[in-house]
Image (cartoon, rainbow, N blue to C red):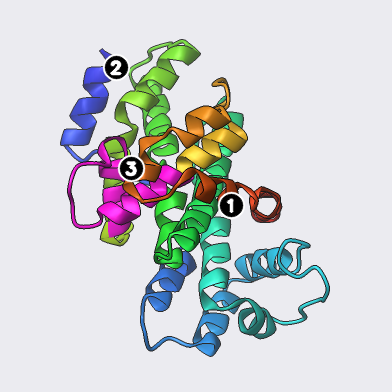
């Protein structure tokens, strides 16, 4: 019964979509504008003191500024670059506070950490394969955003219909509907088509579509995150053999020696995850 109620809500577009923080949306639009500059980005982020503080904290972390202290947002942007500061701002904005999932807070924190790991690893894969590094991050960060969104809606619908569900049922429904919710959220947030398609085709990345390369980079990033973190709170980590045999690397013309080179970045990626998720 609960499954049919969720399906009905989706068809009627009667679901609760968390709002993307206003500044985050503006940051995304600004960084996609070829005429944007560091001054405009600095002023925009500075308009949200909470976000500005988080960006400066990450920018001054050991992962990004091990040998110096950045004293202003403009200095941070000048040193780290517009695109990296935008990544930091987006990662700071996509956090557990956007979702109301009582009893599942730990699960949501892990899923968002996994998404961040996917984003950072996708950048490393893109860099190794000489593809667009910046676009890889955003698709990776949002590829599983439907999970907390779906779980939030299922919890609300269960409460409204006065149904007591086991935790496993909530998780099963999250798995069942996460793609539909993710696509809906990405479209509501006016995300680039690369993000929407990374969600839509993630489980069918070999299917031709306009942004297939970015979807493959996202899948590769997720496989590396699965190797380093595990897929969810319960699943075992992907083994090195399983990682190297993943077909997506062949699709990207990435060889086992390339995977070894990418894995050499693990300490750096782990440090970035710690800085951006703490």
User: Where does the N terminus fall, quadrant-wise?
Assistant: top left
Please report contact status of discs 2 and 3: CB closer than 8 Å, yes or no: no
Does label 1 or label 2 sit earlier along the sequence? Answer: 2
Q: Nearer the viewer, residue 212 or 107?
A: 212
* Element marked by disc 1: helix
The magenta span reads 194-221
User: Residue 2, which numbered label?
Assistant: 2
Measuring from the top left, give residue 239's x and y in whole percent.
Answer: 56, 27
Mark 1 or mark 3, which is nearer to you? 1
Let me know if residue 170 appears in the view: yes
What residue is shown with label 1?
Answer: 261
Q: Distance between the residues labelled 1 and 2?
A: 47 Å
Residue 254, position in %: x, y? Answer: 42, 50
* Mark 1 vs mark 3, CA separation in Å: 32 Å
What distance separates the C-alpha of mark 2 from that of mark 3? 19 Å
Which of the 4 quarters of the picture holds residue 72? bottom right
- Residues packed near mark 3 inside 10 Å, few (<14), some (14 to 19) or many (20 plus): many
Q: Position of residue 274 (x, y in %)?
A: 70, 50
In the picture, measured across the screen, residue 63 lies left or right of residue 94, that is: right
Describe residue 70's horizontal placement relative to residue 98 as left or right: right
Secondary structure, magenta segment, majority class:
helix
Decide: marks 1, 2 in contact (CB < 8 A)? no
Q: Which mark is residue 182?
A: 3
Residue at the spot x=37%, y=33% of the render?
A: 150
Q: Is residue 102 visible?
A: no
Q: How crowded is mark 1: few (under 14 residues within 10 Å), some or many (20 or more)?
A: some
Going from the N terminus, do you reach mark 2 or mark 3 first? 2
Q: Where is residue 196 in the image (x, y as percent from the top left)?
A: 28, 51
């Amino acid at each position: 019964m609960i499954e049919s109620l969720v399906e009905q809500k989706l068809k009627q577009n009667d679901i609760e979509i968390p709002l993307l923080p206003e500044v985050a949306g503006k940051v995304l639009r600004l960084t996609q504008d070829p005429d944007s500059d560091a001054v405009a980005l600095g002023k925009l982020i500075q308009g949200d003191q909470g976000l500005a503080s988080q960006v400066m904290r990450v920018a001054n972390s050991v992962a990004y500024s091990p040998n110096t202290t950045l004293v202003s947002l403009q200095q941070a942007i000048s040193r780290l670059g517009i695109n990296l500061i935008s990544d930091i701002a987006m990662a700071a904005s996509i956090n557990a506070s956007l979702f109301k999932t009582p009893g599942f807070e730990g699960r949501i924190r892990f899923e968002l950490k996994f998404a961040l790991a996917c984003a950072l690893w996708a950048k490393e894969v893109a860099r190794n394969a000489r593809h667009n590094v910046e676009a890889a991050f955003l698709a990776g960060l949002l590829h599983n955003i439907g999970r907390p969104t779906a779980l939030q809606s299922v919890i609300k619908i269960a409460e409204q219909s006065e149904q007591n569900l086991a935790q496993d049922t909530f998780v099963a429904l999250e798995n069942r509907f996460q793609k539909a919710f993710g696509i809906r959220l990405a479209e509501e947030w006016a995300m680039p088509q690369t993000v929407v398609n990374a969600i839509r085709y993630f489980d069918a990345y070999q299917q031709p579509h306009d942004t297939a390369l970015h979807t493959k980079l996202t899948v590769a990033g997720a496989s590396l995150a699965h190797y380093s973190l595990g897929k969810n709170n319960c699943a075992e980590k992907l083994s090195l053999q399983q990682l190297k045999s993943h077909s997506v690397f062949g699709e990207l013309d990435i060889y086992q020696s390339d995977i070894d080179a990418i894995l050499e970045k693990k300490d750096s990626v782990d440090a970035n995850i710690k800085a951006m998720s703490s």
